[in-house]
Image: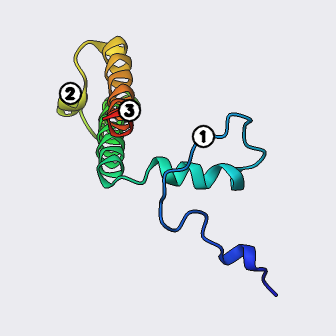
Amino acid sequence: MSSDKEYQVANPSYTPLPYNFNGYASFDEFYPFYLGEHSHPKNRRLHLVGTLGALTVQLRVLVSFIPGFLTYFRQIIPPAKLNFLRIRGGRKAQLKIALIGLLQGYLFAWIGHYF
């Protein structure tokens, strides 16, 4: 048998709720507040855009590692054919681009919450 709590929706109307300054004892207490914070459609869209943008940038950085991983297969794929995948500037540039992607994702989320 299943309990009624399994089918109860935390905040079905997405009504913004005040923050509990005493803290939340569980995720079940926090989740209705969380849903209220994300009640505006623009907020959710900006979160989606930021997340997709950040994931795209992170994927690009991961793809730039492929030529380095394939150096063991030089006979099969010549390294010169994979140079277009590299990010110019080496590891520092890869790290910089990865951090920019992360900040981009958070920037869109912050804009969605505060504007």
What is the quadrant of residue 114 in the picture?
top left
Q: Amino acid at mark 3?
A: Trp
Q: Are marks 1 and 3 in contact (CB under 8 Å)?
A: no
Mark 3 or 2: the one toward you: 3
Q: Nearer the viewer, residue 10 or 102?
A: 10
**Residue 83: assigned label:** 2
x, y (%) of residue 76? 29, 41
Query: Label 1: few (<14), some or many (≥20) within 10 Å?
Result: few
Q: Is residue 66 above or below residue 13?
A: above
Mark 1 or 2: the one toward you: 1
| CA distance separating discs 1 and 2 | 51 Å
Quadrant assignment for the N terminus:
bottom right
What is the quadrant of residue 91 in the picture?
top left
Quadrant assignment for the C terminus:
top left
Q: Are marks 3 and 2 in contact (CB under 8 Å)?
A: no
Residue matched to label 3: 110
Q: Amino acid at mark 2?
A: Asn
Q: Nearer the viewer, residue 31 or 63?
A: 31
Return the disc, 3 or 2, that comes first in the chain's sequence: 2
- Left/right placement of residue 54 relative to residue 83 reads right
x, y (%) of residue 12? 52, 68
